[in-house]
Image (cartoon, rainbow, N blue to C red):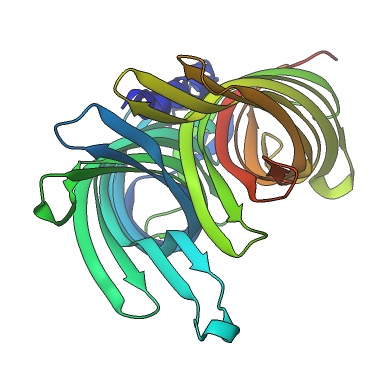
Amino acid sequence: MRYAVSGAVLAFALSAPAMAADVIVEQPQSIVSGTSVYDWSGFWVGAGGGRGAVVHELGLIGFPVSFNGVGGDGFFGQLSAGYDHVFDNGLVAGIAVSGRYGNIETTLDIAPVPFFGFPGFNADVTAEYGFDVIGRLGYTVAPRTLAYVLGGYTWQHFDISTNFTGSIYDWSSSGYVVGLGVEHAVRDKWTVRSEYRYSHYSSHDVAGAGFLSIDPSTHTFHTTLNYRFNGGDSARTIAPLSYDWTGIKLGVAGGAGAIVHDVDLIGSFIEFNGIGGEGVLGEINIGYDREFGNGYLGGVVLAARVSNIETSLNVGGFNADIQADYGFDALLRVGKIFGGRTLAYAIGGYTWQSFDLSSSPAFVTGDWDLGGFTIGTGAEFAITERITAYTEYRYTYYEDTEFNSGGFISLKPSTHTVRAGAKFKLY
């Protein structure tokens, strides 16, 4: 699908400034004059987890009908193992295998009606477990920080179950995964890795009936703690860089993500999580950071964005879209500076978003605005005395909106987005 390129776009945004970092050189230990670079070579194992969203695109086989889509979100746990090799020019190449188990799911709930003896109904479509086999290519952008892109093979098992019957149908799909990440060494043998992965799975013919097809894709954010068997300082050095984190910064970023609309019918008697969509975004931002004692940092960020994150329905010559088209954020962030050049931070605050409903032919149109809150996490690293690069994950939950005065139908959107970009410090 057209959003599969989003991982590559994000990867370029992160890796391009990274390649402009100070050149890493190898010298005998006896004459090292710069800052020692972490040795990423060798085997490693890791454990962690994350959060993400799934979007199922539905299609009628043999008919010009598609719906993108049915969405859901949730958490997962992950175990990983891999091997990395550092080349003489400072590039890091590696291969890894990761397995996961989680509850990223779409849920339909119908409330019980005791008067009629109806006990209630629940049905779930869950991305239960799966694995990835990926390769990655990265560069040491700070003495103990690695930025990288990744890609490879992914496999996922899905299950449909109800509260009456348990599992009623399951299937497995394979596909490709692309993404980007940052890894930082916190101790000689211990590192923390945060990465975004976009996975797209092959089409599945539901029940083999040749009638209904489903094409899943996921947007997931992963954080793992890793043990490196050969971890520690290497013979390579990087030229020292003095970066003052206090000041005003202008930034630009690109990103991607998914949206999930929780649907409530008849005053929440029927709840469906949900209607999904996905797309890419662009952002500009301005912020102020202040460095406090012991390497701690606090700051504010104002950001504006445009996007085409949307849900689409196509039936023959009719098309309808719900698009999150533009919005802004007013956020606070707090973080910790490591080694003078790498910042790990949490971010949160207020978000405003414009939504647009359009169709062709123009049978249904409309627009509405919603406020909400955002929380997230990110990593930023200094490239020069004025330029930093960063990658960031955000989860945003919006207030609900009613489509009629009686409250018969309401939507509660939420988004999972990742962005990567660069900032220029004004002073």
On the image, the x and y values in percent for residue 106 come to 44, 57
Residue 21 location in percent, x, y?
A: 54, 20
Q: Quadrant of residue 295?
A: top right
Q: Which residue is rendered at x = 20% and y = 41% of the image?
A: 202
Please give the name of the residue rendered at 21% of the width and 45% of the height, measured from the top-left corner: 212
Nearer-the-camera pick, 138 or 60: 60
Taking 336 as reference, is 419 left or right?
left
90 or 211, nearer to the observer: 211
Q: Is residue 187 above or below residue 365?
A: below
> Could you tell me if residue 418 is visible in this image?
yes
Residue under the point 55% across and 62% down:
270
Is 220 or 342 nearer to us in this picture? Answer: 220
Quarter that holds the C terminus: top right
Instruction: Report x, y in % for residue 303.
Output: 75, 24
Q: Is residue 153 left or right of residue 41?
A: left
Give the vertical position of 267 relative to 150 (above or below).
below
- Res. 385 in view: no
Q: Is residue 426 left or right of residue 412?
A: right
Please state the horizontal and vertical placement of residue 38, each as a whole percent of the image.
49, 43
Above or below, 122 against 291 in this view is below
Give left or right: position of 64 versus 48.
left
Task: Please tell me how many numbered marks the rendered image carries.
Answer: 0
Q: Residue 290: name its quadrant.
A: top right
Taking depth in this image into account, of 425 and 321 the one nearest to the observer is: 321
Query: In which quadrant will I find the N terminus?
Result: top left
